[in-house]
Image (cartoon, rainbow, N blue to C red):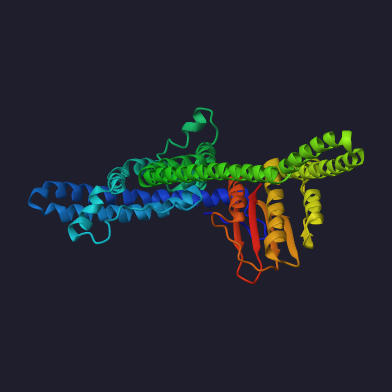
Amino acid sequence: MTTAPAPGELGPSLAQRLFRQLGLDTLYILIGFPLGLITIVLFTVGFSLGIGTLIIWVGLPVLLATFMMARGFAVLERARLGPVFGHPVPPVVYKRAPGGASLVRRLLTPLGDGQSWLDLLHGMFRFIPSTIAFSFAITWWAGAIGGLTFPLWDWSIPRGAGDEDLPMLLGLGDAYSTRVIFHMAIGFFFAGTLYPVIRGVTLLEAVFARGLLCGVNELREQVAAAQAARDIAQAQKTAAVSAEATALRRLERDIHDGPQQRLVRLAMDLSRAEQQFATDPEAARATVAEALTQTRETLDELRALSRGIAPPILVDRGLQAALTALAGRCTVPVDLDAPPISRLDPAIETTAYFVVAEALTNVAKHSHATEVRVSVQPAATGLMITVADDGIGGASLAKGHGLAGLADRVQAAGGVMSVASPAGAGTTITVALPL
């Protein structure tokens, strides 16, 4: 298994990596061949003996011993697969008897585990790819080494008296030169194809082992990962629906308590002014002037509500400008640390804006703080937001509290949120949003 070079150090060259992998693959094949011979004998004899004597109960411990041996050889093989694939193979989780199970059930559990049967199957048939790989490895290594070193051992080959003259009679030149060129050409052929051939037969043996020894476990992990992804998606969907419902209820409440009440009063004032114009024009003018004031205040409230829905400054100028405007409107002094960053995904920018806006609103309403610190920093994998005040603390993410809807909005965006708010020690809200 390769490791990344330390900073300032040069990593191994391509030739070094190829030679190293060639050595690891060859070692894997050379060890795998005798292991295949050992396992086929042990497992075939053990399984046959166990099945044959199972009727008199003697075969049960023989079968269990065979399965345990298969498991041990499977663990060894998984460890050997790491250098071949360049990364360690994750361990396999075998079926276990539940706690408090009887001795008989604990002993019989391996017989009901599908992976145990696959381990046994691998041990009984691994000799097939092992023998193929071993044959190719021996042939190619012998051809490469023997051909390239032919001039060193040519003298040891016994020859008859006419063997030296035959090449010259055929017009092939000197016999020794002809032999050297021929065998060296063979050596170069085997040496040139040594790495792809050894790598290919190694993968043949390793893929066979991985399919039987790790396939079921990898499939389980994929299913578990898919299930976890589905659960996360479902949680995000639920959080999005909850956040949207909370936002709509708050908007409805704000409209009902603010602009709607002012509009009702405005209608009453205008109706009263209409009646006063005939009898008391001065009072009518005063009523109209008051109605104009109510209109301006209603427009201000509607603008504030529209900023809460889709703040124009966030869309036009970005997150930093929007956060600066938020800090300027807050009634509690804000220490803002938000460096300029490039434009992000609109959903992430909107979520970050509402996190800070809602947090500052809660600080102004409930914390009795004298200062609040806001930090928005880009990280390697996301956006880190921290809002900390020196107020009375006691904030909570529990349902029914003001931060619950904010947590739903963060979760809907794929982020996480934590709140630290000990009594009397202020509140710190930390949010991580994915980019």
Residue shown at 8% from the left, 48% from the top:
55
**Nearer-the-camera pick, 346 or 182:** 346
Whether residue 214 sits left or right of residue 6 in the image: it is left
The percent coordinates of residue 103 (x first, y second) are 19, 60
Q: How many marks?
A: 0
Q: Nearer the viewer, residue 221 or 254?
A: 254
Among all residues in the image, which is located at the extreme front? Answer: 279
Residue 277, how many percent across, how many down?
88, 35
Q: Residue furthest right?
A: 282
Whether residue 183 sits left or right of residue 358 in the image: it is left
Expressed as whole percent of the image width and height from the top left, the position of residue 168 reads 51, 32
Residue 310 visible to the viewer:
no
Q: Which residue occupies the foreground of this view, 131 or 330? A: 330
Residue 191 screen position, x and y as percent:
52, 42
Can residue 115 be seen here? The reply is yes
**233 above or below 42?**
above
Q: Among all residues in the image, which is located at the extreme bottom?
A: 424
- Farthest-out residue, left: 56
